[in-house]
């Protein structure tokens, strides 16, 4: 019997197994991460090798450099994850991997490592979407959190509002029509001469500034749950270039603060509006921009005023990590979803 047919049976049995240990792998961008997660919420280990310092000198992620560094790191990170979790490879019930969305070459390193491992251990391979992984980061941080809830997904690659009816059943309410919000943060940071990644730098600098510039987001999407951030991004870039040309002094902290105020107003107002429209009293934030302090402050306040419970992942699970992939995989396997064949390949883009 070939691998996939053998796995169908094993996969089915995991649905009812009492304790399920998932070894998960994440390599979609510039973090190589391997985690061991028990029963979806108990993180036994979560090792992350970040390449931030390597890419910083280029001002952003260089895909080829990212892939090469994943290759160098992944075997050791895997061994570290096993040892930190105090388990052996024989304890692994399933291997889960991010197969998209992300950088093709970077994803392929994780996918190929996962395929080899699942085959060698003769355990099921589970293909996980990075975006759904970000949502699952909340299950780790909040042991009692269960769907249904509204999710504000804010990362470097995605910006969306989803209604999460169940672990594997969600509906897209709105998405960005152009740039992801993380992309806008990174671009604005770059034009202000801040280092990569820009989001956390804007977050820090904005604390020292005032919202003295009146930036705007498009009014055309006001009545929808869609977003547009390319306009405000261009507005900031043009302002900085014009001021530079005129030799004017640029108050970077004020620009960072004004940009952040405008963007976080837009995100938080639409997220609350979605909760009200869907009559759902739980709001969950997911993705790297969810680490933004100002966004969290606004969401906490607005949720309090509207009697909505607010959840966001603890900082280390906001940005890319393998534990969230292991959590997501657990809820997929419980519903019999995601079993992959050894022909699994990486997908740079995945629809929400
Ligand atoms: O979720 P993530 O780690 O990777 C993707 O799936 O894209 O998100 C990365 C994005 C980057 O654009 C980064 O600048 C942004 O999240 N980010 C932040 C903060 N921390 C990370 N943006 C604003 N404020 C932060 N504190
Ligand atoms: Zn991510």
Image: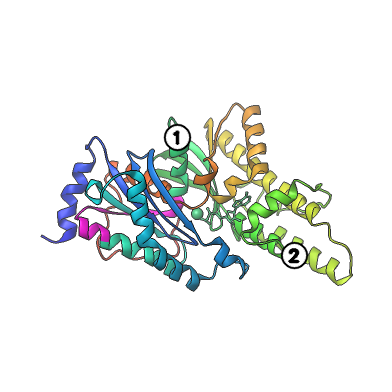
- Which residue is labeled 2 in the image? 237
- Looking at the image, residue 321 sits to the left or right of residue 239; the answer is left
- Which residue is labeled 1 in the image? 148
Q: Write the residue at 45% across / 53% down.
A: 48
Q: Quadrant of the N terminus?
A: bottom left
Residue 177 versus residue 223: which sits nearer the camera? 177
Q: Write the residue at 35% across / 56% down.
A: 78
Which of the numbered marks, if any, corresponds to residue 336?
A: none
What segment is highlighted magenta in the picture?
117-132
Residue 16: give x, y in percent of width and height.
Answer: 22, 37
- Residue 270 within the magenta-colored segment of the rendering: no
Above/below status of 142 relative to 317: above
Residue 295: give x, y in percent of width and height.
Answer: 65, 43
Residue count near mark 1 (Cα–Cα under 10 Å), binned few <14, some 14–19, many ≥20: some
- Looking at the image, residue 139 sits to the left or right of residue 186; the answer is left
Q: SS of the residue at dot 2?
A: helix
- Looking at the image, residue 51 sits to the left or right of residue 10; the answer is right
- Residue 120 within the magenta-colored segment of the rendering: yes
Q: CA distance from mark 1 to mark 2?
A: 39 Å
* The residue carrying mark 2 has its beta carbon less than 8 Å from ligand 1: no
Above/below status of 97 relative to 169: below
Residue 102: give x, y in percent of width and height.
Answer: 46, 62
Residue 61: give x, y in percent of width and height.
Answer: 55, 67
Q: Write the residue at 26% across / 49% down.
A: 94
Q: Is residue 175 visible?
A: yes
Q: Residue furthest left?
A: 1
Circles 1, 2 touching at the beta carbon (< 8 Å):
no
The tag earlier along the polypeptide, 1 or 2, is 1
């Amino acid at each position: 019997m070939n691998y996939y047919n053998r796995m169908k049976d094993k996969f089915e049995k995991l649905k009812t197994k009492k304790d399920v240990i998932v070894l998960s792998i994440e390599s979609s961008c510039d973090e190589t991460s391997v985690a061991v997660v028990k029963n979806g919420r108990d993180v036994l280990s979560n090792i992350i090798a970040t390449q931030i310092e390597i890419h910083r000198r280029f001002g952003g992620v260089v895909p080829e450099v990212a892939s090469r560094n994943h290759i160098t790191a992944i075997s050791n990170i895997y061994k570290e994850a096993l040892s930190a979790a105090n388990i052996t490879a024989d304890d692994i019930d399933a291997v889960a991997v991010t197969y998209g969305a992300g950088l093709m070459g970077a994803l392929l390193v994780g996918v190929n490592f996962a395929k080899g491992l699942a085959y060698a251990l003769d355990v099921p391979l589970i293909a996980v979407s990075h975006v759904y992984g970000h949502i699952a980061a909340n299950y780790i941080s909040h042991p009692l959190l269960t769907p249904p809830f509204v999710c504000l997904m804010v990362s470097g690659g995605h910006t969306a509002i989803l209604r999460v009816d169940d672990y594997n059943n969600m509906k897209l309410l709105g998405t960005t029509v152009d740039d992801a919000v993380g992309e806008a943060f990174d671009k604005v940071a770059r034009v202000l001469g801040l280092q990569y990644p820009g989001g956390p730098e804007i977050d820090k600098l904005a604390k020292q500034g005032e919202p003295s510039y009146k930036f705007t987001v498009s009014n055309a999407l006001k009545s929808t749950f869609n977003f547009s951030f390319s306009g405000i991004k261009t507005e900031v870039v043009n302002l900085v270039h014009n001021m530079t040309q005129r030799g004017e002094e640029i108050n970077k902290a004020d620009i960072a603060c004004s940009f952040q105020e405008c963007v976080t107003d837009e995100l938080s107002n639409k997220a609350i509006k979605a909760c009200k429209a869907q009559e759902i009293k739980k709001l969950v934030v997911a993705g790297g921009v969810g680490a933004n302090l100002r966004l969290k402050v606004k969401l906490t306040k607005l949720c309090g005023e509207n009697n909505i419970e607010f959840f966001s992942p603890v900082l280390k699970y906001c940005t890319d990590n393998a534990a969230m992939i292991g959590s997501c995989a657990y809820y997929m396997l419980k519903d019999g979803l995601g079993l992959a064949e050894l022909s699994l390949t990486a997908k740079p883009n995945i629809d929400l």
